[in-house]
Image: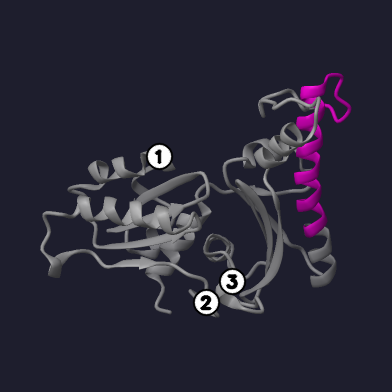
Amino acid sequence: MLLLIDAGNTRVKWALAEAAVAGMGVWHAAGSVPHAEVAELAGLWRGMPIARVVIANVAGPRLREVLQAALDAAVGDISDNTRPPVEWFVSSAERAGLRNRYRQPAQLGCDRFAAAIGARALFPDRALIVAGCGTATTVDAVSADGEFVGGMILPGLSLMTASLAGNTAQLPQVSLQADAAHPFADHTDAAIVSGCLAAQAGAIERALAAYRTAQGTDVACILTGGAADLIAPQLSVAHERIDNLVLIGLQTVATSSC
């Protein structure tokens, strides 16, 4: 089986999946931990029937070291010649049927490329806007004929609210559960959340409108990431909410012949 790992800026998500396209997005086991608890994953993974590991890591070299140590500990009783191969997924000019049109393909965040691959696997032959709503929010365009066109990056919802609290004298750090249903809030906490949600939704809707105009056809909007549940109700456009899109992309990569 495949061990798929999405090492993001805040948390590490993982899933144990079939090495077959028919099982796309269906996990035999899965979990998510903050960076501080990554070492504990060794105990969870020990004894699992892992034949291959594919990892997307955007959290830097230190987390890579911790993940590698956890993997080593998990398969420590397996001889070297039977240890599962590990691929540290990186963006490239083309992978799993998706062509990367970044000027320097390797500079594209591997999580963005994996999410785009996953979205295309779920919605083949569709023009797509893929919005990843995490620590940063990314909004990327994928063409119907299989090109990662490019996209935008902006601070995620939590970063936006934290920036206001950290860089102004009188605005508080707010809970993202504050009531933001009304665009004209009558207290400061809700006003901050409402404004930041509007900024997130506005960026996604603007990208969708621009890409629809450029394509001259319908474009599907896909949302993923930890803040997607907060942002999705603010959108005035049709959209699909997909969990674990990076992991689905990694599974697509692992089951692809190219």
Task: Tell me, yes or no, whether the two marked residues, 2 and 1, touch with CB atoms within 8 Å.
Answer: no
The N terminus is located in which quarter? bottom left
- Amino acid type at image mark 2: Ser
The C terminus is located in which quarter? bottom left
Q: Is residue 248 left or right of residue 184?
A: left
Query: Along the polypeptide, which appears first: circle 3 or circle 2?
Result: 2
Give the residues in magenta.
182-207
Residue in the image at 70% along x and 26% along y: 174
Q: Is residue 32 left or right of residue 150?
A: left
- Amino acid type at image mark 1: Ala
179 in the magenta segment: no
Query: Along the polypeptide, which appears first: circle 3 or circle 1?
Result: 1
202 in the magenta segment: yes
Q: Residue under label 3, please give it.
A: 107
Out of 26 and 160, give the one closest to the viewer: 160
Out of 38 and 116, give the one closest to the viewer: 38
Mark 1 surroundings: few (<14), some (14-19) or many (≥20) residues within 10 A: few
Q: Residue under label 1, please give it.
A: 36
